[in-house]
Each structure stands twice: as C-alpha cells, then as structure tokens.
Amino acid sequence: MSGECLIIRHLGRQGYTRVWRGMLDFTTQRTAGSTSEIWIVEHPPVFTQGQAGKAEHLLDAGDIPVVQSDRGGQVTYHGPGQLVCYLLLDLKEIGIGIRSLVNGIEEAIIQLLSEQGITATRKPGAPGVYVNGEKIAAIGLRVKKQSTYHGLSLNVNMDLQPFSRINPCGYPGLAVTDLAALGIDTDVVSVADKLTAKLAGILGYTLMEIA
C-alpha cells in the first residue's frame, strides 16, 4: 500500500475523446514524483471499443458516435447519469499488479453497493460488478510503464436502452442495470464521493480533492 496522496478531479460532463487524450498525455508525461489522480466525469452518449474490440459486438450504433480506444475489453456505452472514474495510478507506488488492482476496484464497488442494501458479485473471467446477473459496473484499463489509465464506469441513473444496441463488454444478451432501477435515489457526484473514498482506502491512499 502506498500511503501517498491521491488527487481527485471532478471534470463534469466532457466529450470522451478530449478526456482520453488528456489521460494519455498525463500518463506519458508523468514521472516517478507525479501524484496519482482519479478523474471523475460524465460523458455525452458514446460507444467505445476496446483495443481488441470486435466489430460484431456493435449491433446498431445509430446516431451515437463510436470511438476506437486503447483500453482493454470490448465495446461499452457511456452516457449521462453514469459515473466514470479514470484511474491514473502508479502500480509500483501501490505495490500491486493489474489483476489485484481490478480486484480492488470490484471490491470497492461491491462494498459501496452493500451499504445501499444491494448484494453484488464478481463473475470469473468477466471483469466488472453484477447484481442478479445484470451488469452494473464495467472495468477497462490500460497500462504503460507501470502506470494505469482508463478505469471504471458505474451506472447510476441513466438511459439503459443504448446497451441493447451492443453486446455489452462482448457478451451477447447481457442485461445491464443501474442504481435507479434497483430503487436507489442518488446522483453521480454523491456516488463518486463514496466510491473514491473506498478506492483510496483499499489502495492505501490519502484523498486530496481538487474541483
């Protein structure tokens, strides 16, 4: 565990490509002394393909743009009402590997949902978090020189219909849910505050908020 500070930046609603380029610039320019960060953002509607994403998993994009990204995983959807956390972390600083980081992310989400009375689980071989077999959170990361970027998305209160136009994360027929559908009345900012606190605790960071 690091014991280091972790900067939390609230970016509001921003286009996917702009934030992706910012993450890449941050990651390629960071040094051993750079403070790790989590960026909190909502995106306008967009489908994003993973680096090895297969075209057949995008069924009907319609008027929603599609971006080919360099994260892991297959196609997913981002839109208003979904919390996206981009994890700009140094794995050497945390002292864990990427698999342990994914496990830590899943555990933070599972703990958060448990506090809301929701029982959530993992699925072997399918990163993310599930409630009654329906996916509520997705994880897709990229590592460069032991530094991570991209991150996680957690469905809070959003239009879930676009997920029916893809095979979410490459799984045909996978159902998707959000906190609103599970009876939890909250918003992205409130969930972000709780989730980043849990992530920091699991990874051993001290939070430092920056608007």
Image: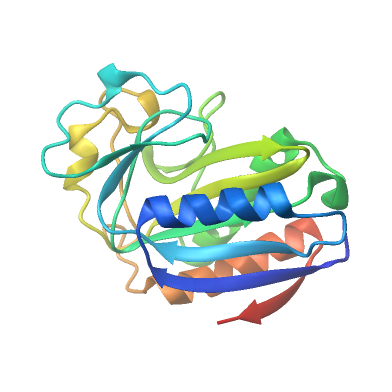
* Residue at the image point whose x is 37% and y is 24% from the top: 170
Q: Is residue 143 left or right of residue 165?
A: right
* Residue at the image point whose x is 67% and y is 60% from the top: 199
Q: Quadrant of the C terminus?
A: bottom right
* Residue at the image point whose x is 30% and y is 65% from the top: 183
Q: Is residue 104 visible?
A: no
Looking at the picture, tell me which residue is in the foreground, 105 or 78: 78
- Where residue 171 appears, as percent x and y from the top left, is 35, 24
Above or below, comparing residue 32 to residue 55 in the picture: below
Above or below, comparing residue 113 to residue 177 in the picture: below
Colour pattern of the rendering = rainbow
Q: Is residue 165 left or right of residue 27?
A: left
Q: Quadrant of the N terminus?
A: bottom right
Looking at the picture, tell me which residue is in the foreground, 158 or 55: 55
Q: Is residue 142 left or right of residue 171?
A: right
- Where residue 51 appears, as percent x and y from the top left, is 48, 27
* Residue at the image point whose x is 29% and y is 23% from the top: 57
Looking at the picture, tell me which residue is in the foreground, 191 or 54: 54
- Where residue 163 appears, as percent x and y from the top left, is 24, 40
